[in-house]
Image (cartoon, rainbow, N blue to C red):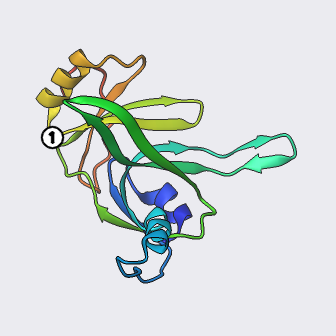
Amino acid sequence: MSAHHIYDNAPLGSLIRFSNGEPRPPQRFTRKLRAWNDENGMGRLVEKVAGRPTGNYPSPATFALHLGNYGSQGTILMVVRRIYTVTSPLRFEVADQPRAGMVRILSRRDGREELHHLAPDEAAAEAWAVEHRYHGAVMEVVADPDIVMPPLEFGRAA
């Protein structure tokens, strides 16, 4: 799939596989393998930003994949995200989507939609929200693909 298709159709919280289509080099070619790993991998879709005109150059829409957290002893020191434009030449594939009943904790503003947490249920989402405060965040229950549900405010039952 194209990057544009991912931006338009993949729901936040999906696991996205990305690839440049090249075969993986042998382990002994460390530089080639490092370069290959930069363009081939998997991440969770955590952000979508609408395109906007800025001066003479229109900025295309983008999406961000969360690739991992690095730290020690329970403390996260570095969060790794990679941002792709909808014009990216890489190939993308939805490897997994959030299941019905899961809850997304999101913030939306200025054409930007960001996933802060994906909880297995509403109780876990409420507990996470109490511990991690985000201004203007909303909870959204993941529904079946055919059912459209409005976002929930914190503290309100479905």
Q: Is residue 106 above or below residue 44?
A: above
Tell whether 39 sits left or right of 133: right
Q: Quadrant of residue 49?
A: top right
Between residues 81 and 140, which one lies in front from this camera angle?
A: 81
Position in image of residue 22 (x %, y %): 48, 81
Q: Amino acid at mark 1?
A: Pro
Tell whether 97 sits left or right of 6: left
Tell whether 150 sits left or right of 32: left
Q: Is residue 25 above or below residue 82?
A: below
Between residues 89 and 68, which one lies in front from this camera angle?
A: 68
Q: Residue at horizontal 47%, vertical 61%?
A: 6
Quadrant of image for the C terminus: top left
Q: Where is mark 1, residue-wise?
A: 120
Residue 151: tell me if it is visible: no
Q: Residues within 10 Å of mark 1 (few under 14, many from 20)?
A: some
Position in image of residue 48 (x %, y %): 50, 45
